[in-house]
Amino acid sequence: WSSGGGSVIKLRYLALGQQTAMAIPVKKIFISDAVHESCAELLRDAGFEVEQKTKLTEEQLIKEIQDVEALIVRSETKVKNSVLNSAPKLRVVGRAGTGVDNIDVEAATKKGIIVLNTPGGNSISACELTCALVVALARNVPSGCQSLKEGRWDRKLYTGEELLGKTLAVLGLGRIGREVASRMKAFGMRIIGFDPIVSAESAAALGIDKMDLPEIWPLADYITVHTPLIPQTKNLINEDSLNKCKPGVKVINVARGGIVDEKALLEALKDGRCGGAAIDVFTEEPPKSEWLLEFIKHPKVIATPHLGASTVEAQTRVAVEIAEQLISIAKPGEGLAGV
Ligand code: NAD
Ligand code: MLT
């Protein structure tokens, strides 16, 4: 039943020939990540018993969710099959955010556990971070700042480039990609892009020239990815595509670790095929492997610790949205915003 862009759907069963919206019995809710306090407040006001504890081990989490019907997470809690199997009363898992990669949705579905998320609640924040990173890459903002803090005055070393007239490739023209496109157009960039489900006509209406990937690689000065991490997008930017790009291309990933092959990107940064990368998401979060730390520390890499959705506005929005969804599914006759 899940998929789509946040459309309102209803859980229904047929009773005596009539379609009736079905309520999910929820009394106790456990919040296991740093979800904004407005979530717990709204749920308590609606009469639910709510407990919030963060940074739990899997064992501690399992202990806490023994008698809860709903679990709310952000991205730190990994809702694995083992967790789902150890929570006998669990009926709903709510993700205060967009991606549900930290939840084993297939296992949940098999057990009849509903997975909810808040697509769109943090899109503008992720888009604005992306735009900030494009500008920061063009103008060497973090390295110039660091150098000055270390007592140097390196004006020549940090000469940048204008975005006016440069080409930005947006891969994934969904909620975030299209917002990035519209904002970066205001800098005078040409926007090209690819998305398998967006037609050339609807891309054109957004001011984007839709092209196939082989056409995109040699044209782009900057490439930003805004797809989900799925088998088709794993290593979408890889050694082969980097070899086909303009020398010095800059790469931005505020989507998911793994869409850009970090090892291939590091090699391309070392030999100049890539002129800079701005990365918010990693295959390993927090990064610990030596090679990944080497990548992050590369002078041409701007790295942020998965900050795309970390704004007061987005965190409040997703907290309120997930609480409202839980309240609505616990009431008969209410609609439900889907994954
Ligand atoms: P969305 O579902 O609205 O858009 C994704 C688009 O990618 C869709 O239009 C889809 O057709 C397209 N797509 C799928 N396969 C593709 C392919 N092979 N090539 C090109 N396009 C493809 O998603 P969204 O809300 O825009 O989110 C985009 C990404 O950003 C997701 O991975 C999401 O998890 C991530 N995200 C990250 C942060 C963060 O904190 N860094 C915050 C919010 C979202
Ligand atoms: C998301 O998918 O919403 C992002 O990863 C943001 C988050 O950390 O919640």
Image (spheres, helix red, strand yellow):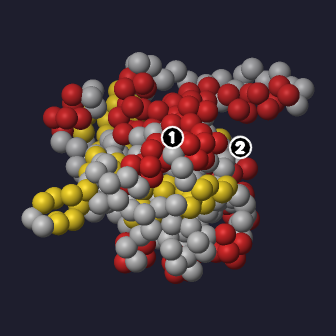
x and y percentages locating residue 81 in the rendered image: 51, 78
The C terminus lies in quadrant: bottom left
Give the residue at mark 2. Answer: 299
Q: Is residue 90 left or right of residue 266?
A: left
Task: Judge by depth and name the residue closer to the eye, 297 or 40.
Answer: 40
Q: What residue appears at the point 56 percent right and 67 percent down from the top-left corner? A: 68
Q: What residue appears at the point 18 percent right and 42 percent down from the top-left corner? A: 199
Q: What residue appears at the point 75 percent right and 20 percent down from the top-left corner? A: 155
Mark 1 surroundings: few (<14), some (14-19) or many (≥20) residues within 10 A: many
Task: Judge by depth and name the residue closer to the eye, 244 or 10.
Answer: 10
Tell me the kind of residue under disc 2.
Pro
Task: Judge by depth and name the residue closer to the eye, 222 or 247.
Answer: 222
Q: Secondary structure at mark 2?
A: loop
Whether residue 288 is situated above or below residue 128 in the rendered picture: below
Q: Is residue 142 left or right of residue 269?
A: right
Q: Is residue 90 left or right of residue 310?
A: left
Number of marks in the image? Answer: 2
Under 8 Å from ligand 1: the CB of mark 2? no
For residue 286, the mark is none
Residue 239: tell me if it is visible. Answer: no
Whether residue 277 is situated above or below residue 259 in the rendered picture: above
Tell me the kind of residue under disc 1.
Val
x and y percentages locating residue 188 in the rendered image: 40, 19
Whether residue 123 is situated above or below residue 186 in the rendered picture: below
Residue 231: tell me if it is visible. Answer: yes
Which image quadrant is residue 183 in?
top left
Give the residue at mark 1. Answer: 320
Q: Secondary structure at mark 1?
A: helix
Under 8 Å from ligand 2: the CB of mark 1? no
